[in-house]
Amino acid sequence: MPDTQISAIICTHNRDTYLGAAIDSLLGQDFAADFEIVVVDNGSSDRTREVVEQRIHNQRLKYVFEPTIGLSVARNTGAKVASSDILAYLDDDAVASDRWLEVLYFAYNNSKLAIAGGKVTLLWPPGIQQPRWLSPGLAANLGAYDLGDTTIYIQEPGSTPRGLNYSIRRSFLEEIGGFDPHLGRVGKNLLSNEELQMTEFALQRGWQVAYLPEALVAHNVAPERLQRSWFLNRGWWQGISECYREQLAGKAGIAQLQRGSERFVRGLYKSLQYFSDPAERFDKLVYAYGQIGYLNAAIQGLLSTSNKK
């Protein structure tokens, strides 16, 4: 497909329950130009291949098996297989709105645009509503992302588009050497921050990063994620991810112990401040718990550096 205008990529690992709806939302796009859909099966052991083969008669659809587990690895594989200059990544448990590809594609008429993503709403399991103890901040850990109804050019990496609704210009991706396999999920660990790192790289190099509200995606909330233990585990891995990101940026050292300790105390203090508010109280506890993960990774990094001397 040499004239493919945009490539939609789904990286998937054992999500056959949701995958079909994700693929169908792409096959049903209201987009007149040529596009393709690449499904990267990242070492799945469930019915993933069968789900894809049920739809493989559609010429837009490609399937590739990537045995090395890891989201960043799978994303890089998808980029290699894809044929267009614009790469749009959709999570395997998400559903794209019918103009998703169109909105993303036309945004890249801006030659300075490196990364773009859109609004994300949540799809709750049948019969389940948002728990009282879930704050808006923690809902972001489930994928929720809403910066309003107007296009925004991101200036702070912390506001970067979510990876479940994410697009990137191929030339920029190649410029920075692809997605970093040291970040991004690997199996059941919840390493993250790869999108934040990408935004940092883009802004440092004079590129632009955009939030496009009309590039709307809905994200399924798996029932197992509506447990406090899942959010604590997510916070722990967020802390580890932040530590690794700093180390990759050359900011490792004793100062990490001070930063992590200060943030841990701040999180505990704020949890007491919000004692009467169950959602905000739990939010601050998750933040504090994440700093324990951060400190654990920082200490391991210092010990590793010491042993190499």
Image (cartoon, rainbow, N blue to C red):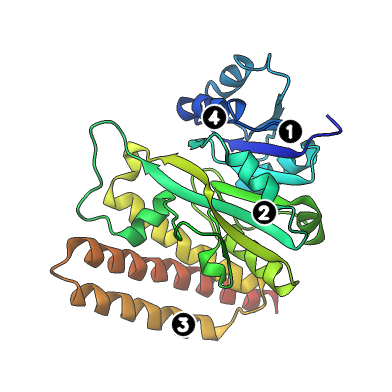
Q: Amino acid at mark 1?
A: Ala
Say which element carries label 2: loop
Q: Quadrant of residue 222?
A: top left
What kind of residue is marked 2?
A: Pro
Q: Secondary structure at mark 3?
A: helix
Q: Nearer the viewer, mark 1 or mark 3?
A: 1
* Amino acid tagged 3: Arg
The residue under label 3 is 259
Number of other residues with Cα within 10 Å of mark 4, as a class: few under 14, some 14 to 19, many 20 or more: some
Q: Pointer 1: what residue?
A: 33
Which residue is under mark 2? 181
Which residue is found at the position 86% from the left and 33% from the top?
A: 2
Amino acid under disc 4: Ser
Whole-number angstrom distance, CA of label 3 to CA of label 2: 25 Å
Q: Earlier in the sequence, mark 3 or mark 2?
A: 2
Q: Position of residue 309 (x, y in %)?
A: 70, 79
Q: Is residue 141 left or right of residue 130?
A: right
When the figure is inspected, residue 207 is found, relative to residue 76, above or below; the finding is below
Residue at mark 4:
25
Question: Looking at the picture, how far across and down is residue 179, in whole percent?
Answer: 69, 54
Mark pair 1, 3: CA separation: 49 Å
Q: Is residue 159 above or below residue 188?
A: below
Badge 1 element: loop
Neighbours of disc 1 within 10 Å: few (<14), some (14-19), many (20+) = few
